[in-house]
Structure formats: structure tokens, C-alpha cells
Amino acid sequence: MPQYTLTYFDIEALGEPIRMLLSYGKIPFTDNRIDFEKDWAKFKAAMPMGQLPILEIDGKVMYQSMAISRYLAKQVGLSGANDLENYEIDNAADNINDFRAKIASAAYESHEEAKQHKYEILKKETIPFFLNKLDKIAEENNGHFALKKLTWADLYFTGLINYLNFIAQEDLLANHSNLRKVVENTHAAPGIKEWVAKRPKSNR
Ligand SMILES: N[C@@H](CCC(=O)N[C@@H](CS)C(=O)NCC(=O)O)C(=O)O
């Protein structure tokens, strides 16, 4: 059996969809968590793109969380059966990633006034726009993001949601029952249920 090591920070965010994919596939992995304050400066230069997560499989270093997710999804049966199905899943994951990037752009803005301005637009326009669109997609897919069944796009959203709530500074799912259903369906999946019950507690 190959040795899997997922290296990320001690949070959910971009590492969590990968932890969920491995758990769903019942693939044992070392959950290596780097202390950002204490140790990150030491590791950063050695990372392929200066960032985390990375997944090592018998020493082969993989990076870019969505590329890793696509790779693992194929291994564990959470990708599509053909190009069109994969398009549907990728499309959903890209929508989710666009939403993530918009929120992150406000959260990591270093200029205080610009940050306030970005949050105002986020709250007034961007968040309601994306949540309504994503909730509609989830409704059309019976509590999933694509193909009316569990795919890696559901794990991508569910893995990110606590982090998105944290950086958006609100409960994004409060008024979106179809998105809550995606999270419930993902949490109920075999392997993921057990992972969520035992994973380190984090609010992001
Ligand atoms: N596109 C990359 C983005 C990775 C990324 O933004 N990683 C952040 C943590 S979520 C990071 O490593 N930050 C530390 C740094 O840039 O020094 C991916 O999806 O893997």
C-alpha cells in the first residue's frame, strides 16, 4: 500500500477536501499539520509553489488542491464517468472556487480602508449572488452540486465551508437549505462520517 502524507496547516480550509477524499476512499494517510507561526517560514521555500496543501504519495509530491482533488476523486470513485460528467463536476467546483476567491480577496486585503470597502460589497452583492446561484444548483441536483449524486465538488464545498464562514464572518448556510443539504449528504457519506467525528476541532 502506498504511503500518503497530506501536509497542511492546522485548519480545514484547502486541506479538508483532500482529507475527506482520502477518508471516503478508506486510504490511510498521515495528517501532517504545520504550525504556521512557528514553522511555516522554515518550510515555505521547499514547497513547489511556496504554498500548502501538498500530498506526498510514496515521496511523489503533488500540489494544487483542485488538481489533487481531481486525481483522488478518480481513485475513489467521486469523479464523472465521461468527459461531460467531469465537465459538470469541474464547473461546479470552479463556481465554488470563484466564491472562495472573492471572499479571500476581502479577508486578505492588507489596506484597512480597502478591506472595509471589499467587505461591504461582499455582504451586499457578492455573497448573496453566489449563495443564491449555488443553492439553486444544489436544489436542481437534489442536495448535490452535480449529477444528482455525491461527487468531489460536494466534498470541495463541504471541506471549505467552515473556513468560508470564518473569513466571511457569517454563517453562509443560515438561509440556504439546499447548501445545508449538500453538507449533510457529504457528512453522511461512508468514511467521511467517521473522519468528521474524529478530526481535530477547528472553526476554519
Ligand atoms: N491554488 C493553491 C492555493 C494554495 C494556498 O493559497 N495556500 C495557502 C493556505 S490556504 C498558503 O499556503 N498560504 C501560505 C503562504 O502563501 O505563505 C491550491 O489550491 O492549492
Image (tube, helix red, strand yellow):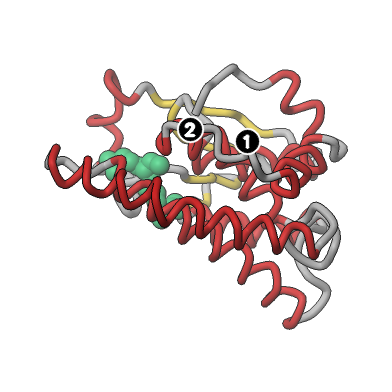
Q: Residue 174 carries which label?
A: 1
Q: Which of 66/126 is in front?
A: 126
Q: Which amino acid does label 1 sit on?
A: Ala
Mark 2: give few (<14), some (14-19) or many (20+) Cα within 10 Å. few
Q: What element carries label 1?
A: loop
Q: In this view, does 123 lie above or below 169?
A: below
Q: Which of 55/82 is in front?
A: 82
CB-based contact (under 8 Å), mark 2 and mark 1: yes
Q: Please give left or right for residue 4 compared with residue 105 in the image.
A: right
Q: Which of 177/193 is in front?
A: 177
In the rendered image, the quadrant that contains the N terminus is top right
- Which residue bears the numbered disc 2? 170
Residue drawn at (67%, 77%), measured in percent from left and top? 87
Q: Which amino acid does label 2 sit on?
A: Glu
Instruction: Give the CA separation, mark 2 to mark 1.
Output: 9 Å
Rendering quarter of residue 67? bottom right
| Residue 26 locus on image (x, y percent) | 81, 38
